Image (spheres, rainbow, N blue to C red):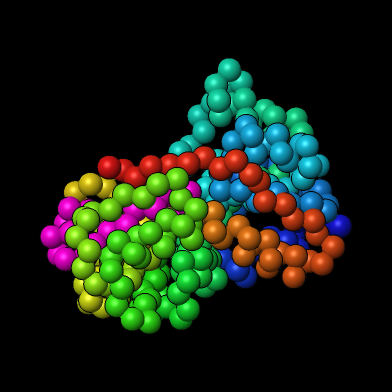
Amino acid sequence: MYSFKEIEEYLDTIAPTISAEPWDNVGLMVGTREDPISKVMLALDVTPDVIDQCIENDARFLITHHPIFFEPCLKIDYSESQGAMIKRIIENNITVYAMHTNLDKAEGGVNDALAKAIGFGACIRLDYLRVGRLLSRMPFLDLADRVDKMLDSNGIILSSKKNNLVQTVALACGSFESSVIPEMVERECDVLITGEIKHHILVDLEARGIRVIVAGHEATERVVLPMLKEKLTHAFSELNVCIATNFIASDSEQ
């Protein structure tokens, strides 16, 4: 077994909590730093089904990408969904830990996992953005089909069906942040691959000549879980690491 401190310190080398956005909530969410850890469950979100899997697999340490608390928790009402989950977490002695924006931007984090999953090698790392180049120019719709298949998406949304040739690709996991658009323009990106995007931003990018492939929030982020499992099992040879199944599918903000 390992101590919480050992694992927490290692996670902080992967994705330092200090690098998370000021509005974000990362680190210990629920539980204790005192109990020894032998089995870990990895998931994108805290859901009733994920809690069930923790209990069934006797995993008392749950690491999620999205924090269970985004807003201040003003009450814990067991008759409400979040209150009921917190009750079960505490009753079953499950410790919950979140790695969110710090993991998005980290080297070897979510965006790098997304680039690897789609088949990109070396990419330019730009905080919440990765920029890569295809070996040769490719029809836009062929790239979209490749993304759909390689991410096993529940369906993609395209900004256009114009099948122009593309080569320089920007990748941004989860929800697209428009502040990176100047970087995309500077690097002459032809395409953006992201998880979800607001409609007016999609329209703006299309007007700039940048095609958009919206592959789903969950599809662009779950790719990090196998990489995180690999890192943990390499660092802690006797740690049992599981990945939760039955993820929640999400649509874009269309």
Q: Position of residue 55 (x, y in %)?
A: 76, 36
Q: Nearer the viewer, residue 10 or 57?
A: 57
Residue at 40 percent of width and 47 percent of height: 155
Towards the viewer: 99 or 165: 165
Residue 61: horizontal and vertical position, in percent?
73, 48
**Which residue is at 62% across, 32% downward?**
48
> In the displayed image of the protein, which residue is found farthest to the top?
79
Q: Position of residue 180 (x, y in %)?
A: 29, 65
Residue depicted at 36% across the width and 74% down the height: 131
In the foreground, 100 or 117 = 117
On screen, residue 55 above or below 239: above
Q: Is residue 206 magenta?
A: yes
125 sits left or right of 54 in the view = left
Q: Which of the two residues, 46 or 219, is positioned nearer the viewer here?
A: 219
Q: Which residues are magenta?
A: 202-220
- Which residue sits furthest left? 207
Does 59 appear above or below 223?
Answer: above
Task: Indicate the quadrant containing the C terminus: top left, top right, bottom left or bottom right.
Answer: top left
